[in-house]
Amino acid sequence: MSTPGAGHEFPSKEVSWQKRDVLLFANSIGCKADELHFLYELHPQFSVFPTYSVILPFKLTEQEVTDFYARQQANPVPGVPNFDYRRVVDGQRKLTILKPLPPTSAGKTFELLNKVIGVYDKGKAGSVMESEQAVVDKVTGEVYSKTVSNTFFVGQGNWGGPKGSATISYPPPEDKKPDAVHVVETTSETALLYRLNGDYNPLHATPEPGAKMGFGGTIIHGLFSWNTAAHGVLRELGGSDPNSLKEFQARFASPVIPGDKLTTEMWRTGDVKEGLEEVRFVTKNQNGKAVLSNGRCLLKVTGPTSRL
């Protein structure tokens, strides 16, 4: 039996990016000077960081700041409540990379196809909308990436919808030291830089929305933590090779406060198929609390020594 909203397709939207956008993204997620292929447009192997496509649903074609709330409210889903996007946070993301994006969209026309998988009522806590976004070449129909997203609408449940089934868990191995560790020190300015990629949710810039949602003030984008973890995994285990990463997913377990220290621990599972190994990871703050859980990716593991 289908859930409310399942199969609803939002209008397709054009997406575009310039080399400058690619450089900004790589800088904002912490790429290092020995990864110039992400940071220098004249590098002979200049590449888009492989998770960049997750920002495109926010950016679309814009080069100017946009009104986050107004853009979200313009897309109601039939059969479910009109949720308040002023009280929304990320739940989980899973990215599947089918083909690397070119350093610029110039010369091609790309579109974002976005459809609802289901909407689930979690009671007093809120509601979850699961959707899939695909970045597609509009002329050829070729799919470059697919992202399955869970969006959590805080305190907006109890409307009589289905609860939804439990998601698959990917816990890290017990009693085994991580194979690699990556540390990110956030600052009061971290979210203010990351938002320039196109995600202008006021929750990450000013304290009022976060205070109303019970977070105590400003919090950093969940996708900042998600993307920095992806950078850490690729840097430490994939030799910073943009072609090594094929799948990446994590659940947003708790908010990140500006100034938090984020430590991503990674474990190789030894499960290798078609040259891709399953890697599991968890990201914790300085107090040992998980901010990203259920971390799993498929990666060509080459180690951190083969910088491009």
Image (tube, rainbow, N blue to C red):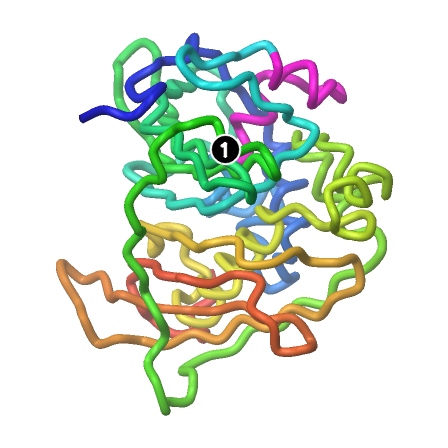
Residue identifier under label 1: 158
Q: Is residue 301 visible?
A: yes
Total marks in image: 1
Q: Does residue 289 belong to the magenta stretch?
A: no
The spot of residue 218 in percent (x, y) is 80, 47
Q: Does residue 60 belong to the magenta stretch?
A: yes
Q: Is residue 132 visible?
A: no
Task: Pick whichever, 153 or 176, lies toward us.
Answer: 153
Picture quarter with the N terminus: top left
Quick one: label 1, few (<14), some, or many (20+) residues within 10 Å? some
Q: What amino acid type should be assigned to the residue bearing mark 1? A: Asn
The spot of residue 269 in percent (x, y) is 26, 75
Residue 126 lies in what quarter of the image?
top right
Residue 300 lies in what quarter of the image?
bottom left
Q: Determine the residue positioned at 81% across, 52% down.
A: 216
- The magenta stretch spans which residues? 55-73
Check the image and name the residue furthest to the left.
274
Q: Determine the residue positioned at 46% across, 63% down.
A: 293
Q: Determine the residue positioned at 38% across, 18% down.
A: 113
Q: Determine the residue positioned at 64% across, 15% down.
A: 71
Q: Is residue 217 left or right of residue 131?
A: right
Residue 118 vs 70, above or below: the answer is: below
